[in-house]
Image (spheres, rainbow, N blue to C red):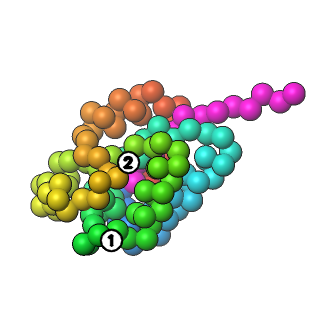
Amino acid sequence: MTNKLVTDIVLSVHSAPDDSRSLLAFHYAQAALTLGHRIQQVFFYEAGVLHGQHMGTQVTPVAAEWLKLATQHDIPLVLCATVVEQDYQLSEADLHDGFALGGLTEFSMAAAKAERVMQF
C-alpha cells in the first residue's frame, strides 16, 4: 500500500487574464487537484487582480474557469484590495462576486500554513 502525500498549496497569480501564465496557473491548479493535493487559496496580485473584473455580467474565459474550479473545490479566490483600488481604481461593483478582496496579510497567513507556494 502506497502512502500518497497530499500537499497544501497556495497560488499567487500576478499575470493578467490574457497572459499565457494565467492559463498555466489554472492548468497547474487543475493538475494538482487531480493528483489529490489541496489548494488553500489563489491570491491575485498586480495585473492578476483583473481576473476579478467583470464587464457587465461577463468575466474573461480564464476567470470563468477559475470561478468554476473554486466552486467545485471550495477554493478562496482573493484579489489584493490595495492593487484593485489604487492601481486599477476598481470598486467592488466592478468585481465578480466569486472573488473576495483581501490583503497581503491574508496571503501571508495562507502561505505560512502551506507546504508550497507557486507564483505565476
Is 103 one of the magenta-colored residues? no
| 81 to the left or right of 49 | left
Q: Residues within 10 Å of mark 1 (few under 14, many from 20)?
A: few
Give amino acid for label 1: Gln
Q: Nearer the viewer, residue 91 or 18?
A: 91
Residue at mark 1: 58
Residue at mark 2: 77
Location of residue 64 in the rendering, given as x and y in whole percent from the top left corner: 43, 64
Can residue 44 be seen here?
Answer: no
Give amino acid for label 2: Leu
Location of residue 9 in the rendering, given as x and y in whole percent from the top left corner: 52, 39
Of marks 2 and 1, which one's residue comes earlier in the chain?
Answer: 1
Q: Nearer the viewer, residue 59 or 82?
A: 59
For the record, the magenta segment spans 1-13
Spot the residue most to the front: 57
Q: Which residue is painted at 30% across and 34% down in the image?
A: 106
Report, in whole angstroms, how far the alpha carbon at label 2 lies from the one at label 1.
17 Å
Location of residue 103 in the rendering, given as x and y in whole percent from the top left corner: 24, 40
Q: Which residue is painted at 74% across and 32% down in the image?
A: 4
Q: Residues within 10 Å of mark 2 (few under 14, many from 20)?
A: many
Secondary structure beneath dot 2 equals strand
